[in-house]
Image (cartoon, helix red, strand yellow):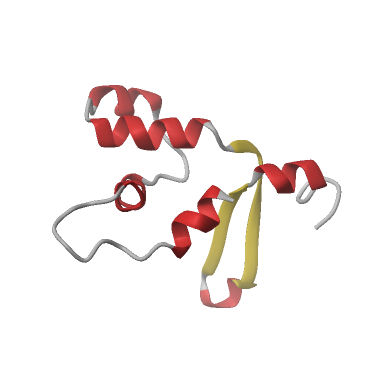
Amino acid sequence: KTARYLASIAPSTEGNKTDSDILREQHRFLRDAEADDEADSWEVRMARKYYDKLFKEYCLAEMSGYKKGRIGMRWRTQQEVFEGKGQFRC
C-alpha cells in the first residue's frame, strides 16, 4: 500500500522536497549495503529503511511489453504476501 500511495502523490512543485520525492530519487530495486554505508546522508538512510521493510522473497514482473524491451518489476506488498500473490497464484 505504501508504494501505491507514494506513486499517487504528485511531486513537490515548490523548492521543498517531500519524503516521497526523496524516496523516488534514492530508489534502487536492489540496494548495496556497502554503498549505502559509504553515502552517509539522511536521504539514503531513509530509502534504505523503506527498502528493508519490503517483502523481497518474490518480485512481481509486468511482462506485457517484453517485445518492446519494457519489463516492469516490483516487490510484493504486505497484502499480496498474505494473499499468496506471486507465490501460490499469479
Residue 70 position in % (x across, y down) = 52, 70
Residue at the spot x=54%, y=57% of the render? 4
Placement of the C terminus among the 4 image quadrants: bottom right
Q: Is residue 33 left or right of residue 42?
A: right
Q: Is residue 32 left or right of residue 86?
A: left
Q: Is residue 63 left or right of residue 6?
A: right
Relative to 34, does residue 60 appear above or below in the rendering? below
| Depth order, front residue of 79/40 | 79
Residue at the spot x=46%, y=60% of the render? 7
Relative to 54, does residue 1 appear above or below in the rendering? below
Residue 45 position in % (x across, y down) = 33, 29
Give the total number of marks visible in the rendering: 0
Residue 34 position in % (x across, y down) = 34, 23
* Residue 62 occupies quadrant: bottom right
Q: Residue furthest right?
A: 88
* Residue 12 occupies quadrant: bottom left
Relative to 55, does residue 75 appear above or below in the rendering? below
| Depth order, front residue of 33/15 | 15
Residue at the spot x=78%, y=41% of the render? 82
Residue at the spot x=36%, y=47% of the render? 23
Q: Is residue 54 left or right of residue 19?
A: right
Residue 33 position in % (x across, y down) = 39, 25
